[in-house]
Image: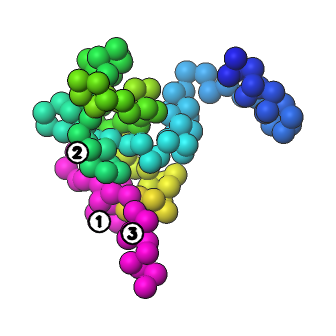
Amino acid sequence: DTRKQLANYISKLEVPIVSCGRDSKSLRRCVTSAFFCNAAKLEADGSYRTVRGQQRVHVHPFSVLHQHPSPWVLFHELTVSVKPYILGVLQIEPQWLSEVAPHFYKFKGGAAPRDDTQDADGADSGARKQQRRG
């Protein structure tokens, strides 16, 4: 069981186990720090566009967020059947991306978008990093 494994690791590190209670924001920010490279932005047609790779994807019909789309999401898994579907989807705030991974995200205007009027410039690719080095 994953919960027991995590509890064991935490106790070995002597970190106090503290619940976030009903504050889902703390938990979502934590997940954002782990899965920052799997972000996607809602498109006008209801699909999502991944920030890394600009791939058009859809929330899987079994997901709660399929019926309640969010402007920005993280996903755990991408699978392709009839369409490319994202699974393990979590609603996020876009500014969290540049806060938890400034090395990975740059946004137009220097700051993360706070609404749908701005768009992500995308992730630094290895090729871009190589070009900067010379």
Which residue lies under the disc numbered 1?
A: 109
Which residue lies under the disc numbered 3?
A: 127
Residue at point 79%, 33% (across, down): 9
- Is residue 69 something that shows in the picture? no
Residue at point 38%, 70% (across, down): 128
Q: Secondary structure at mark 2?
A: loop
Q: Amino acid at mark 3?
A: Ala
Q: Position of residue 115 (x, y in %)?
A: 26, 45
Q: Secondary structure at mark 3?
A: helix
17 versus 62 height, above or below = below
Who comes first in sequence, dot 1 or dot 2?
A: 1
87 versus 109 height, above or below = above
Residue at point 43%, 32% (across, down): 77
Q: Residue furthest bottom?
A: 134
Q: Amino acid at mark 1?
A: Gly
Q: Residues within 10 Å of mark 3 (few under 14, many from 20)?
A: few
Quick check: 45 left or right of 101? left
Q: Position of residue 45 (x, y in %)?
A: 13, 33
Cα distance, mark 1 to mark 2?
Answer: 14 Å
Q: Position of residue 18 (x, y in %)?
A: 72, 28
Residue 121, which numbered label?
A: none
Instruction: Find residue 59 and report its image quarter.
Output: top left
Q: Please state the extent of the stretch shown in magenta in the rendering.
A: 107-134
Quick check: 21 left or right of 15? left
